[in-house]
Amino acid sequence: MNERNPFRMKILGRTIEHLGSQMYKQRAPSLIELVANAWDANANNVWIEFPSRENYEQSTSAIIVKDDGIGMDEQAIRDCYMVVGRDRRANVLSHSDSRPIMGRKGIGKLAGFGMADTITITTWKGKGLGEQIIFSMDSGQLITTAGDVTDVHFSWETNEKPLDETWTETGTLVHLSRLKHATPLDEDGLKETLSRRFSRNVRGRMKIFVNGTPLSQPDIETIYSYPAEIEKKYDTHILRDGRKVNYRYEFAKSPIGSKEMQGFVIYANGRTAQSPPFFFNVESSASGQHSTKYVFGEILADYVDSCDTEGDVISTDRQELEWERDFLNPLREWGIGLTRKILRECADMKGSKLEEAVLSDPDLNSRIESLDTISKKEIKRFLKILGGKYNFEDEGTRDLASGLVKAYEFKQFHGILGDLESVQDDPEALSMILRKILDWKVLESRALLEIISGRLAIVAKLGSMIANDAPETASSLTNDNMHDLMAGNPWLFNPEWQVYVEEKTLGKLLGDQAKEYSEDIKAMRIDFLALTGEGKHVIVELKRSAYAVEMQDVTRLLTYKATLEKSYQNLSAVLIYGGTHNIPQGSWGSVKTMQGITIITWSELFKRASSFYSHYKDVLEGNVTASGFGEKATEVMKARKIVALGTSHRPPEERKQGLGSSGY
């Protein structure tokens, strides 16, 4: 190795701090600058190497960027590389490939200082073995006092290029050490960023490798691409100022999780001029704004970075254009119109696909078809809104569609339709309302349904016990008896009744008044004493279903009533029996018409309870075809009408329909 006269770089105080570590705080932009340098060096390949997460150590690890470009000789380094702020386009390095030059400000060489404190350059030029030139730049050398101009010297040396197949005939290797970041690079994230920060044309002419893997187009499943022709990558548009742009866009099937892949990226000379996600600032006001997670595209606008541009309109870090400049107005106006158009198109397309999928679902379609014409039309409209954000294949989307249909099936039972209308342009808010129908409405309904279903099971048990002539009270022959069933489920008598006394003697019920009665009277034992919803008391006497009622049973019930009437106001009595008796017909007729006495069969009690709860089960289960559902819907509509009109008056046509249902 032979040491040569040092390279010299003139540095105006704090230049490196401003243009290196401060401008390139993120590692991806730093690496993008180094890849752009490789492009300008006419490289066909560029390799980026860095340690894996497991092998990363800040103090010892390195990041390497190597290319097979034209490389530099001593003169090129002195006259070009060492000049900060050199306009490369005004002094293009000669190479055979006529490709647009990305570099313009001559500061990309400093980008490495955003990642490392030491940059070592190895570059070689020429055929055969040739020589490598090696020199290092340390950030400490370049930090000078503000306002001072310093001549910084870099020693260099040469070395023969190794006989290694991994080394190309010409090229440059940038070795970054003494790294500034405690965490390793995210390989997947870097690949994604690089794939978006260089146009397809660039990536088609220069291969980029990350840890040995060639960079590829991100794998996004799409439902639409424009231009649609496979061989046509871009469409062309002439702006109102006569300048040309090329563009393409696509709609993803599922939401794009990465911000880097969403929206437009604008390229100038193959490199980012406006980074993604970019929607020309209309994403918050455009129709179909929720399609922003599905739309991605590219715009080629080389003219914004041309030499005849009136001043630089691209930020130094290549993140954004200065849109307030009049020069960019034609591009901005066209972009706004295009973005609004494609966001709306994406929402409409996804909405149509969701509507098609829902109508292809046999269950959902049959439910929709059973509704009235207006409801069907409204459901299809809301499905298109939902489709702007959700795919039918996504988990939970079918439930949302089912909730939407349910909203119209149950529209008589709640005011949810007004809430739906209030969010008709917002699929996210619409889904939240539908989830409420599926969540808290369903939870509430399920709780009630469990109660109703449980009561219907008890009713079924009652029917079975009636058919099997279950004993009146506990028996050693069976676990079933009427007394225990009715005691545990007093709603079987009446939904509003509450049993609070069971198998008590009259003496205990009479309390202090018991002394007025004989021991035989006081020893009599009633089955139940119930309290109605109106605060009245009811004596309940049970007889097994196969038992034939005798006159003495009636007499005993009358005795109960007469004895307790002084202590319990508004007292009545109920006798439940199987339907047979041994009482002369005339006397039986008199018994059944006695004031304050009700005689009912087990069969009648069973039918009444079953009918009552079956009505509500139809509603809670959403059995929209059942008669009970329709009856309850009509009942709710009539109630709302009375509340809205403030009167219960029925017009002639309603009077002809007859009386309303009691629910039994």
Image: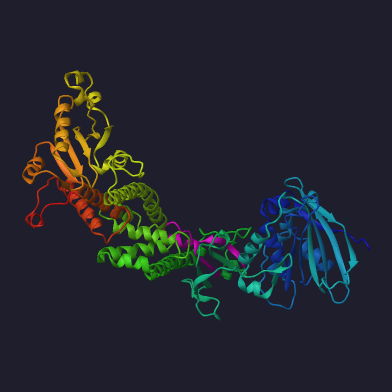
| Image: 360 above or below 289 | below
x and y, in percent, of residue 132 in the image:
86, 67
Looking at the rendering, the stretch of residues picked out in magenta corresponds to 271-300
196 vs 236, nearest the viewer = 196
473 vs 419, nearest the viewer = 473
**Quadrant position of the N terminus in the picture:** bottom right
| Image: 22 above or below 369 | above
Residue 42 in view of the camera: no
x and y, in percent, of residue 5 in the image:
89, 60
Q: Total of numbered circles in the picture?
A: 0
x and y, in percent, of residue 205 in the image:
67, 75
| Residue at x-position 44% and y-position 65% | 392
277 vs 391, nearest the viewer = 391
Asked whether, in this view, residue 295 is left or right of residue 383, the answer is: right
| Image: 416 above or below 352 | above
Q: Quadrant of residue 173?
A: bottom right
Q: Residue 280: within the magenta? A: yes
| Residue at x-position 23% and y-position 32% | 526
